[in-house]
Image (cartoon, grey):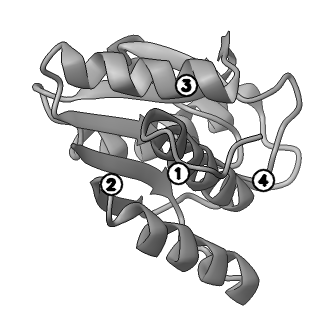
């Protein structure tokens, strides 16, 4: 299975990069992982709704260039469906059983995802009603993908 994580911006904090590297290494025995970083836009303080739409549209265009027609696209969105770790594992397993060999997970920037990306998504996933920093979300997402593979393999990790 090929798994892509697509997100705007670079992770600057060393501790987050170290965690991303660790989970990427752990996942390498289960799937081919590709982390795609697209340029992010700076959001001015007190930006109007129109400016925020323009920023999301620019980031959305950059993200869209990496989306593949044959991939199952999962957008992380606060209004998406919340799944337990077991349910996420089952979703990944079911996609593989149905012949999907490429999953792309999209994380939005600091103000979220463009509507065009949300419409393109085959599934919207929410980790919580809370908002998380998009750099930290990469670590959380990688950990949950790793947990899903461990669950599906019947290996100890998830309790």
Q: Residue drawn at (62%, 50%), measured in percent from left and top? A: 156
Image quarter (top left, top right, bottom left or bottom right) of the N terminus: top left
| Nearer-the-camera pick, 90 or 11 | 90
| Direction from residue 127 to residue 123 in the image, left or right | left
The answer to whether mark 1 and mark 4 are in CB contact below 8 A is: no
Residue 118 in the image: above or below residue 154: above
> Label for residue 146?
1
Q: How many marks?
A: 4
- Disc 4 marks which residue? 133
Q: Nearer the viewer, mark 2 or mark 3?
A: 2
Q: Secondary structure at mark 3?
A: helix
Above or below — where is 24 with respect to 158? Answer: below
Question: Is 137 positioned to the left or the right of 96 in the image?
Answer: right
Residue at figure coordinates x 62%, y 53% from the top left: 143
Could you say where residue 31 lies in the image, as x and y percent from the top left? 28, 53
Q: CA distance from mark 4 to mark 3?
A: 21 Å
Q: Quadrant of residue 43?
A: bottom right
How far apart marks 2 and 3 lie (CA) works out to: 15 Å
Q: Percent position (x, y) of residue 84?
A: 70, 22
* Mark nearer the viewer, 4 or 3: 3
Tell me which numbered mark, 3 or 1, is placed earlier along the sequence: 3
In the rendered structure, find residue 88 and report the number of the disc placed on it: 3
Q: Are marks 2 and 3 in contact (CB under 8 Å)?
A: no
Of label 1 and label 4, which has the lower sequence position?
4
Tell me how far mark 2 sits from mark 1, CA to CA: 8 Å
**Label 2 close to label 1 by CB (< 8 Å):** yes
Question: Is residue 145 found left or right of 121 in the rendered image?
Answer: right
Residue at x 35% of width, y 44% of height: 63
């Amino acid at each position: 299975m090929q798994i892509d994580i697509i997100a705007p911006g670079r992770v600057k904090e060393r501790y987050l990069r170290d965690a991303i590297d660790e989970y990427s290494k752990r996942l390498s025995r289960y799937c081919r992982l590709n982390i795609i970083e697209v340029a992010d836009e700076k959001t001015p303080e007190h930006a109007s709704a129109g400016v925020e739409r323009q920023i999301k549209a620019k980031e959305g265009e950059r993200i869209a260039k990496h989306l593949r027609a044959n991939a199952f696209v999962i957008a992380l969105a606060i209004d998406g469906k919340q799944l337990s770790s077991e349910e996420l594992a089952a979703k990944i397993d079911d996609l593989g059983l149905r012949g999907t060999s490429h999953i792309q997970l999209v994380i939005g920037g600091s103000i979220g995802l463009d509507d065009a990306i949300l419409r393109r998504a085959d599934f919207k996933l929410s980790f919580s009603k809370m908002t998380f920093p998009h750099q930290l979300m990469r670590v959380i997402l990688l950990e949950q993908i790793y947990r899903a593979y461990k669950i599906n393999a019947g290996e100890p990790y998830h309790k």
